[in-house]
């Protein structure tokens, strides 16, 4: 999710309402109270059932520490997924060194088909591609820092799929693309080895959905946090998407009517609270398509 300033949110809410929410602690409580959402869907080309856990927008560093990640990992392992996917924005502070505490927790994830992730826009701030209060000044060697962190994630058992994919079974291919805002996403390269397998694609930013090819079976996205702060009847105060509320959260459709799921994510961005938008670990039970 892009940075949402306190002033912007307060102005959108008329000031007093959100001030009372934050002062009463309700927003802070919702920010760290997560749940597991479960969905069952067919996936064309799949020949055997598949359980996928999707964790996105961890935002480790600014408002999120190792304790929160540990709870998410434990909840995920209790679901016994076949595959775990990380949807980007794992990081949210300057990374002069690899985040050992985060990687130690991610290394505890258990899934027989593995753990894979993609980068998001806040990860690029952590590399030093751009500057900010939690990132410090931009750094000229940010590509080297990105490579260093990719190696660290791989060593922790969570390799990053940057415009790449893996055939995990005879009937399953998982692909991931670079961040839409700060990277160079290449969907063709990510899908190059898919063949006729059922295909899962992970993109941090759902704004890529209208441009995906027909052969993508299911796309998983993060980035929006569901808006993070939502109001009754009105929905999200702001969504970091050129499409407004269209891809804010939940089940949506991309090009060719291809299904996609946009998770509310787990961490926090901009302000340290949520409203009517609890964090989620998403569990998908995918089945062979009928016929």
Image (cartoon, rainbow, N blue to C red):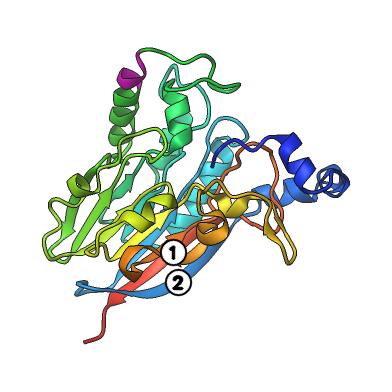
Residue 81 shows in this picture? no
Q: Name the residue beneath numbered marker 2.
A: 39
Residue 180, given in percent of the width and then of the height, sits at 38, 41
Write the residue at 32% across / 55% down: 211
Residue 253, given in percent of the width and then of the height, sits at 41, 66
Decide which of tag 1 and tag 2 comes sooner along the chain: 2
Q: Nearer the viewer, residue 269 or 98?
A: 269
Whether residue 201 sits left or right of residue 230 in the image: it is left
Write the residue at 42% across / 39% down: 120
Task: Estimate how packed mark 2 is, as few (under 14), some (14 to 19) or many (20 or more) residues with alpha carbons within 10 Å.
Answer: few
**Total numbered labels placed on residues in the image:** 2
Residue 144, given in percent of the width and then of the height, sits at 30, 18
Q: Nearer the viewer, residue 20 or 215?
A: 215
Q: Is most of the magenta stretch helix, strand or loop?
A: helix
Residue 123 shows in this picture? yes
User: Mark 1 to mark 2: distance in Å?
Assistant: 6 Å
Q: Which residues are magenta?
A: 141-145
Cβ atoms under marks 1 and 2 closer than 8 Å: yes
Quadrant (top left/top right/bottom left/bottom right) for the C terminus: bottom left
Quadrant (top left/top right/bottom left/bottom right) for the N terminus: top right
Residue 137's place in the image compared with 59, above or below, is above
| Secondary element at tag 2 | strand
Write the residue at 25% across / 85% down: 290
| Secondary element at tag 1 | strand
Q: Name the residue beneath numbered marker 1.
A: 283
Q: Nearer the viewer, residue 8 or 224?
A: 8
């Amino acid at each position: 999710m892009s940075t949402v300033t306190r002033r912007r949110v307060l102005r959108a809410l008329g000031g007093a309402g959100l001030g009372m929410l934050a002062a009463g602690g309700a927003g802070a409580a919702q920010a760290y109270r997560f749940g597991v959402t479960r969905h069952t869907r067919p996936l064309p080309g799949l020949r055997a059932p598949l359980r996928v856990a999707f964790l996105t927008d961890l935002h480790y560093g600014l408002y999120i520490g190792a304790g929160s990640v540990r709870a998410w990992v434990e909840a995920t392992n209790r679901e016994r997924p076949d595959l775990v996917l990380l949807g980007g924005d794992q990081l949210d502070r300057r990374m002069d060194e690899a985040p050992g505490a985060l990687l130690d927790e991610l290394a505890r994830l258990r899934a027989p088909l593995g753990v894979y992730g993609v980068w998001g826009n806040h990860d690029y701030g952590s590399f030093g591609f751009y500057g900010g209060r939690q990132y410090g000044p931009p750094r000229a060697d940010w590509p080297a820092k990105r490579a260093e962190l990719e190696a660290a994630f791989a060593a922790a058992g969570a390799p990053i799929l940057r415009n790449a994919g893996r055939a995990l079974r005879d009937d399953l291919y998982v692909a991931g693309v670079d961040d839409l805002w700060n990277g160079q996403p290449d969907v063709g390269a990510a899908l190059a080895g898919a063949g006729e397998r059922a295909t899962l694609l992970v993109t941090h930013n759902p704004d890529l959905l209208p441009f995906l090819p027909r052969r993508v079976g299911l796309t998983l996205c993060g980035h929006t946090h569901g808006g993070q702060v939502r109001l009754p009847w009105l929905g999200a105060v702001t969504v970091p998407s050129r499409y407004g509320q269209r891809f804010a959260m939940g089940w949506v459709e991309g090009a060719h009517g291809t299904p996609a799921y946009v998770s509310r994510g787990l961490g926090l961005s901009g302000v340290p609270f949520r409203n009517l938008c609890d964090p989620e670990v998403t569990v998908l039970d995918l089945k062979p398509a009928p016929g």
